[in-house]
Image (spheres, rainbow, N blue to C red):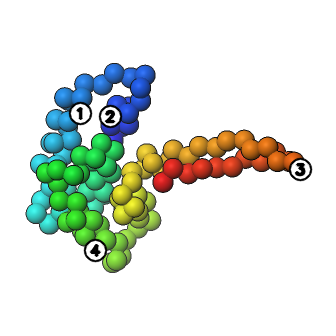
Amino acid sequence: MAFSCISTRSDVSVDEGKLNNMLQELKKRQFQNGTIGNFRTTALVTQALFIHDSYKTDFDLDSAIKFLTDHLSGRNSRLDSYYALPVLNRRSLLNVTSGHCRKESDASESTMKFEWLL
């Protein structure tokens, strides 16, 4: 996921071929039931695939999401929810952490407004 994040920055040069090979390798590891190893690995890999829209080919997104939701409907930890909730919103943790704020002037006072890019 970090490599995908770095590749989206305009000031950094990334070998797109290597990135695509890495994403393809992750997709090959998906089992028929949608998992990629275990629950957290499935959630993290799916998040990584969202960054470059790589989930659209050679990846069974519906099975991965079904696996995650089935697991969350049973006993789970807060950490499991932390990893899965971005996926259920078709986002990654990188989207969740990319909040921007801007200063708006008001006649009575200056306030800060946060715009969350979700």
In the rendered image, which residue does mark 3 sit on?
108
At horizontal 19% and vertical 29% (from top left) the residue drawn is 17
Front tag of 1 and 4: 1
The residue at 21%/41% (across/down) is 23
Q: In this view, does 53 lie above or below 85?
A: above
- At label 4, the amino acid type is Asp
Q: Which of marks 2 and 3 is in front?
A: 3
Q: Residue at x 28, y 53 (%)?
A: 46
Residue ID for mark 1: 19
**Real-space Cα separation, disc 2 to disc 3, in angstroms:** 45 Å
For mark 4, does the 10 Å Cα neighbourhood hold few (<14), some (14 to 19), or many (20 or more) residues? few
66 relative position to 5: left or right: left
Instruction: Examine the rendering and report whether any part of residue 50 can be seen.
Output: yes
- Residue found at x 43% / y 22%: 11
Percent from the top left, x then y, of residue 72?
35, 72
Identify the amino acid type marked 3.
Answer: Ser
Quarter occupied by the N terminus: top left
- The answer to which of marks 2 and 3 sits earlier in the sequence is 2
**Label drawn at residue 70:** 4
